[in-house]
Amino acid sequence: ETLKKILSEAPTMEADQPFPGRVMRLHFKCRADLPIGSALRVTGSTLWSPTHLAQEDPLQTLSAASQTASQAPILSTGAEEDWVDVNILNQSHASTYTSSIEMYTTPETYPLWQTRRPVVIVLHKPKGIHHHYYRYLVVTPGAKDGETLKGQRSVEEEDISDSDSERGVESQYQVATTSNEYSGASQVMLWEDPFEQFSGNNLCNLPYRTIDIDTVTNEVTDQDQIDNWNGKEDASFQAYSIREAINEENRRLLQSEMPSRQISRDGSRTPPFQTQQRIFFVCYHLPVVVVQDKGSGHWKASWTDSLLAKTDGSQICSTYQAHWVGTVTTHPPITKEEDKQAVQLLLEGMNCYPLFLNSDMAEAHYFGFCKQVLWPAFHNIDILDLNVEEQSSWDQSNLDNWWKAYKEVNQTFCTTMLGLIQPNDILWVHDYHLSLLPKLMTSGEINLYGKPITRQVFFLHIPFPTSQIFRELECGSWLLEGMLHAHVVGFHAFDHARHFLNASKRIFGLKYETMAGGLIGVHFSGRTVMVTMSNVSIEPRMIDTILRFPTVNACKSALKEKHDGRFIIGGCDIGQRLQGVSFKLLAFERLLRDYPVWQNKVVMVQRILLPGTRKGDEGQTVGELRFLVKRIKDTFGEAVMDYEEIQGSSIPTDQRLALWKASDVLMATPLREGLNHWPMEYIYARKEPETPGVVIASEFSAVASILNGALRVNPYDIQMTITTIDKALTMDLQEREGRRYRDIDFVSTSPSDKWTKNVLRDLKDAIQMAGSESSQTSAANTPNTSRHGHQQIIDSTAAYLARESNLSFTRLNREAVKRAYDSTTNRVFILDFNGTIVIKEPPGKYLKREILGTSGNKPLPEVIEALNKLCTDSKNTVYVVSGDSAENVLNAIGNVPGMGLAVSNGAHFSTPVYPGQKRQWHIFDLGVDWDAVKRVALPVLSKYTARSNGSFVKLTQFSIGWSYYSCDPEWGSMQASHLVLELKNELRAFDVRFVTLKGVVEIVPQKLNKGLFVKKVLRDAVRKSNQGIDFILCMGDDISDEKMFTSVYSYVAEIGDEENAQPDPPIVDENPRSVELLESMKARDPMYTYTVAVGKKPSHASQWVSDGMEVGNLLVHLTGGQPPIKTMLEEKGIERFS
C-alpha cells in the first residue's frame, strides 16, 4: 500500500512557479588557436562523457573506440550505485563516448569559434539557478590513433617506466570518441586541462566549466560570455576552482589529523568506511548461550564457538562498532516478561539485540519452512524424492502456513533493523533463514529515507542448489530476488556460486561477467551485485586454550586405552541422511571383509548428533545406522565399532578435541554439505609436536576444495573409499607430515576475523566498482573530523558531476506537465507501446525477466479513453511508436480515431486516421535491397535454427529476426554470438546492422531507428499547423526508445536552421517534390519538452516515471480524469512483482 501511495503521488506546484520542463537553447563561444584541420567542439546537453557512456550508439563510435583502445581500463564514475547504472559503465572497458556540438570559425573571426546549433537544456528546477556543466574538446577528422596536436599533450600520453618498456608492456589508456548527428565518429584528440591536474587514465576527473541559468527569467548570468581554450581565469572555471579549493582545504585538515593517511587529489584512496563505522551481523540464532542459574535465578550469557561469535582480540570489533541481531534460545525457556527484559538487558551489554518471536511463528518458520522445505532443497534434494524416502505426504496447507511464517519472521527482522540502522551502516545478513531480508531492508530504507542508506552483504553458509531443483520451490523467485538486493552475495565454494549464477540467469534472465579484481558481477535492477567466494577456518586462540584443558588429554587417553592400541578412524556427524554416514559404514564393513588384516588392528569411533531439527530424517537415518552397526559387530566383533548417539547439534569442544587427538584418521563423507570446520579443527589439534593425522573428505563437501592435504573420496564409490582408507592407515610419517604442511598455514591463520575483513574488502570493491563514493557515502568515505564542527567532504570531480547529473534526472512531476499542457497550443505526443502505454504484468517464475513481452496485450480502458480524448483535441498530434508488428498494435489501439501509428521501430507508419477514412501505411526507403539480404541471410539462419531447439526465424518487411528466447539460455546466447559473427561476414556488402536484444538477433537497416520517425512527426506537426511546437511529450521504456529522446533534442536544436537540417529519408512510392520544405522560424518561448524514461535507469531522457501505470495516470490526468488507475491484478489484490 505504501508503494502504491508513492507511485500515485507527485509533488505539488505553487501557482506562481515556472513549470519544470522548459527548454533553454544555449550558444557557446570560445577562442582557440588550433592547427588547420582540427576542429573545436563543446559537449552536448548532458555531460555524458567522460562521466557516462551512451546507451545506444548508432554511429558506431563505441566500436571505433574499442578498436583503438582494447586494453583501456574500466571507467569509474564515483557515483551512487542507485543513481548510476554500472552496467552501462562496464559495457566497454576500452572507451568512453561523448555527444558533442560542432563549432565553426571563419577566416574573419578566427580564432573565435562558436556553435552552429545550440545546446539544448531542459530546466528542471521550478525556482533557482540551473548549473550546466560542459567541456571543450578537439577532434582531428582522419587523424591516426594516438596522434596529438602539435605542441600539446593528449590524454592518451602516459609515462611508461623503463621496467615496463623493457618488458614490452603497452601503455593502457582510455580513448574517447565523439559524434553528433551528422559528422560521424571522431576520436577526441585533446581535452582542456588548464590546471594541469589530470593524471592517470580516468578522464572523468578532467576540469569542467559551468554556466548558470536563472530558471525564473530563463536567462544566462553572462549572455556575452566568451571562453578561452585552457583559460584558467575564465569565469566558467570559477565554480570548479572553488570546489577544488574546498577539497584541498579538507585534505589539509584530514592530513593534519591523520598524517599517516595518504589522500589523493581525486579522493580515490580515501578509506571506503569511516573508523568505528557500525556493522550489524544479522543471523537467525544469536551466537550466544543464555542460561539461568537455578539457585539465584540470575541469567548468564556467553559467546558460543560459532563463526559469527565475538572473539578475543578481534580487529573487526576494534575497527567497527559491531552489533548482533537475532533470536535467542534460553535454558530454560523464558515464560515471564521480567525474564525477557532481564535477558534483553544482559545481551545489550554484549551489543546483541535479541528478538523474541511468537512460538507458533518460530516453529513454522524454522522447523517448518527452513528445515522441511529450504534445507533439503538447498542440498539438492528433489521434493518428490524427499517425500517418497521419508514416507511423508505433501500437505499444501502446511506449506502455505510455513511460507507465511517465513515472510513474517523476515519482516520482523526488517522492522527491528529499520529501528536500529543509521546512514552508512553495514548490514551483514547470514544464511537462508533470512533470504528475504535484503529486499525488505532496501524497500524499507527507500520508504523512510528516499533511497537505500546501508551497505548489505548476504552470505549463504549452506550449498545453493542447481537451478532445476531451485525452480521446484514455489517461492524460489522471491528468495532469489531477496538475495539479489544485497551489494555482495557470498558463498563458501564456487560450485554454490555457480548454481546461484545459473539460477539468476534461468529464472530472471540476468547476465553476469567477471569484473576487475576477480569478482563476478550480476546485473540486476539497474546495478551490479557482486558474487564472491570466501573461506574461513577455525579460531586458533580458542582451540589453543581448550587444548590445555586437562579433560582433553584425559579423554584422549581413555579412548586409546579403551581400544587397546588399535588404529582409530574417528568421525562425528549429524544423524541425517545427507551426512553420508551409511556410506561410511558400508565402506568400513567392506574394508574389514576385503582387507582381513585390519580386523584386529582398527576401530571406527563414530559419534552421531541428533539436533531434532529434522526428526523424520533423523529417525530413519538412525534406524539405518543401528542396523549397519549391529551387522558389522555381529560379523567382525564388538571391538571394531565404537558407536554412540548424542542429543544435540554438537558435543563439548574439549571432548571433540580429545576425539581428534586420539584418531589416526578423520573420515567425513557427506553427500552434500556446506562448510564443515571439524576437519580443519582435526588438523590443528594434531599440529606439531603431535603426530599428524590424515583427513578423508568427501569430494562433495566444501572443505574438500579447501584442504589440499586431504584424501578425497566419492562416498558412492565404495571400492574407491576402502582403497583410500587403507592408504590412510598405511601412510608413512613423511607423507602425513607433508599433507599436514599443505594445510596448517591456512587452518591456523584464517580465523573468522580475517574472513570478515576479506568479505568487507569485497564489499568495498563492489561499492567502488559501482561508483558509489559520492554524496550518499561521502560521510562514510571521510574519517570523522567532528572537532572541526562538521564532516569534511572530499569529492572527486567524477563523483561530483555524476551526482549533479543524477540529481537533474528527476521524477516526472505530473502537475507541472498538466500546467504546461494547459498553457500550450501545438502539442506533440510520441508514446512507445509495450511497457509504456501497455503495462507489463508480472510474469510466471519460469520466464526470463529481462526478455518479457507484452504482445497481444492492450492498454487499460482508462488509458484508451485518455488517448481518445487527446486525439480529439485539434491542438494535439498523437503517435504511438512500437517495435511490435502492425497486427498487434492495430488490434490494441487501431480503432482510436485521430491517432498515428508506427511499427517495426518506425520503418512502417501511418498518419492519423479519422472516422470514415482507411488507414494508409507508408515505408521509409532506407537504401537496402531487402530481398537480396534475405537470400544471403536465410540459409545461415536456417542452419542455426536446426541446431538450436526452440529457435525460429521471424520475417517482416523491414527486418529479419532469429529468436532464441525459448532455447536453453546458455546455448542460445552462445549460438547468437556465433551467428552475429557469421552474418557480419556474409552481409558485409549490405548497409545493415545487427541488434541483439530480448532474446532475438535482428538484422535491420543501418539507418533505421525510432528517431528517424520522431523527427518526421515533429516536422510534419509544424507543416500541419504552420506554427512552432511548444509542447513535446516523448515516453519510452526500452533502449530502442533512447534514439527517440535524442532526436527530440536534435529537432529542438535545428529550429531556426531548418534549411541545413538533414532531410527525412524518402518514402517508397512518394514523389520527393511533393514534400513541403520547412521554412526557418523562431523557436517558441516558452517551449516545454518532456522526454521520459519508463523505469529509472541510465537514459538520454530528462525525467523518469516508475512504470506503465504511472504513464497511464499521467495521460488520464492530462485529459481531466482522476488517477490513479489500477491494473487488473491490483484490482484482484495480487501482489506486483518488483
Image (tube, rainbow, N blue to C red):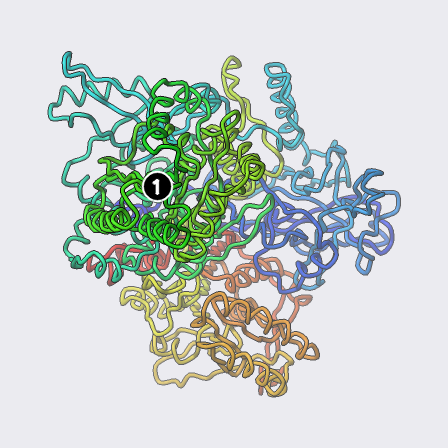
Taking the view exactly as shown, the residue that stands out farthest to the left is 336
* Residue 325 in the image, given as x and y percentages of width and height: 31, 30
Instruction: Between residue 599 and residue 454, name the one nearer to us.
Output: 599
Residue visible at 33% across and 63% down in the picture: 843
Residue 158: percent from the left, percent from the top? Answer: 79, 41
* Residue identified by numbered label 1: 604
Residue 749 shows up from this direction: yes
Relative side of 442 to 37, left or right: left
Residue 423 lies in quadrant: top left
* SS class, disc 1: strand
Count of marks, rendered view:
1
Residue found at x 37% / y 35%: 449
Q: Indicate whether 552 appears above or below 470.
A: above
Residue 217 seen in this snapshot: no
- Residue 1013 on image: x %, y %: 54, 71
Nearer to us in this view, 359 or 246:
359
Residue in front for this viewpoint, 1127 or 1027: 1127
Give how far across and how far down residue 324 sits, in percent: 34, 28
The quarter holding residue 2 reads top left
- Eyeballing the image, is 595 above or below 983? above
Q: Is residue 662 left or right of residue 199?
A: left
- Judge whether 87 appears above or below 947 on screen: above
- Which residue is drawn at the image coordinates 31% and 33% (left, top)? 418
Q: Amino acid at mark 1?
A: Met
> How busy is the neighbourhood of tag 1: few (under 14 within 10 Å), some, or many (20 plus)?
many
Q: 747 or 481: which is nearer to us?
A: 747
